[in-house]
Every structure is written in C-alpha cells, then in structure tokens.
Image: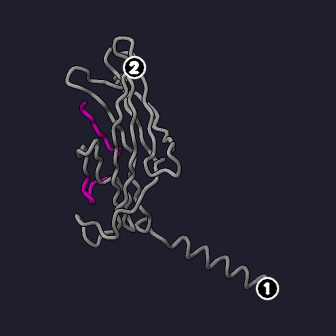
Amino acid sequence: MRNIVFGILVIVSALISCGQDEESLQRIDQILNIYMKSDTNPDLLNSKKAGSYTSYSVNDMFGTRDDSPVTIPLRMTTDSVFYMEYIAGAKRRRLDSVSPSNPGTGNSYNSRMMVTLRKTVNNTTETTVDTLEIQYRKSPTLFQVSKVIYNGKEKFSKEADAPNSINTVTIVK
C-alpha cells in the first residue's frame, strides 16, 4: 500500500513539474562588452599599441572589504580589437522597490566599481581611476542591464522590452 501511495506521489509531482511553460522562466541579460577608445586610438585596451593602457584592475565599491577585486577578463574580437567582458562579480544593491522610469514593473539594482587604468608615458606609469556603475532592471520574467554610467555620464541604456543580447558599451576617453 505504501509503495502505491509513494508511486502516485512521484507521478503527480513529475506531472506538475513538467506542466510549467517557458513563460515562467526569467530571462537574464547581463553580459557587457566594454570597449575603450580615444579620438586618436581606436583600441585603448591593446597594451601593445602606443598610448594604450598597459594594465587595469577593477574593485567592487560595494564589496565587503576595501579591496574587493572583480575579475573582468580581456577578450579580443575577430578583427583584433580588445574589450573587457563583464558577466558578473560585483555586489548589487537595491535602488528602489518600484523603478521610477517604469512604475510597477519590478525592482532596480546597481553595482558600482572602481576601474584603475595604467599606461606608460615617457617611462613613467600614469594611473587613471574611473567609476563604472551598472544599473539593472528586475521583474518576475526579466533581469537585465538597464543603464551603464561611466564617470557620471550615461554610456548605455536599454528599454525593458528590448531583446536579450550581449550589451556593447563604448567608452571614449
């Protein structure tokens, strides 16, 4: 008798779990490809080019310690342009429970990071410290990047109904 009841419970739970449709899944869209260029240099992340940054580091400003590094690997496109690929790693803080730009649509979060860029000029290392803020939009069906702010200036924004994609951000320095 116990085996029959247990068998029925297994079958019922299997049917319930299979009965969910894809609409109940949350779409996640949070990958950022960050390119850096200047008026004279189309690739500031290529350390072999004169005038480019030779190294960089990223620190989570919301981290649990003063030094909370975030790993953002350097990648290269097929036409040899370097970019930083940010997928995740920095802590997210809740901005509000209802987004002011989209009332009633969900929650807003942000991550804030300090980006330290180094380059060599006349045998001297010059260091530049910038701030990167990523704002996210969250609803029951969606989690996505909504804005990217670099040094206080908006560099990227995305509407809530925009399709999932790898988000490309170009920083002109």
**In the image, residue 47 above or below residue 97:** above
Residue 74 on the magenta segment: no
Q: x and y percent of residue 107 in the render? A: 35, 66
Give whichever of 1, 160 is nearer the camera: 160
Residue located 38% across and 16% down the image: 124
Label 2: few (<14), some or many (≥20) within 10 Å? Answer: few
- Quarter of the image where one finds residue 142: bottom left
Quarter of the N terminus within the rendering: bottom right
Dominant secondary structure (helix, strand or loop) of the stretch shown in magenta: loop
Residue located 29% across and 40% down the image: 169
Res 77 seen here: no
Q: x and y percent of residue 36 in the render? A: 30, 31
Label 1 sits on residue = 2
Q: x and y percent of residue 67 in the render? A: 51, 42
Quarter of the C terminus within the rendering: top left
Give whichever of 111, 2 is nearer the camera: 111
Secondary element under disc 2, as helix, strand or loop, is strand
Label 2 sits on residue = 125
Which dot marks residue 97?
Answer: none
Residue located 34% across and 48% down the image: 133
The furthest residue to the bottom: 1
Mark in front: 2 vs 1: 2
Boundaries of the magenta span: 158-173
Q: Amino acid at mark 1?
A: Arg
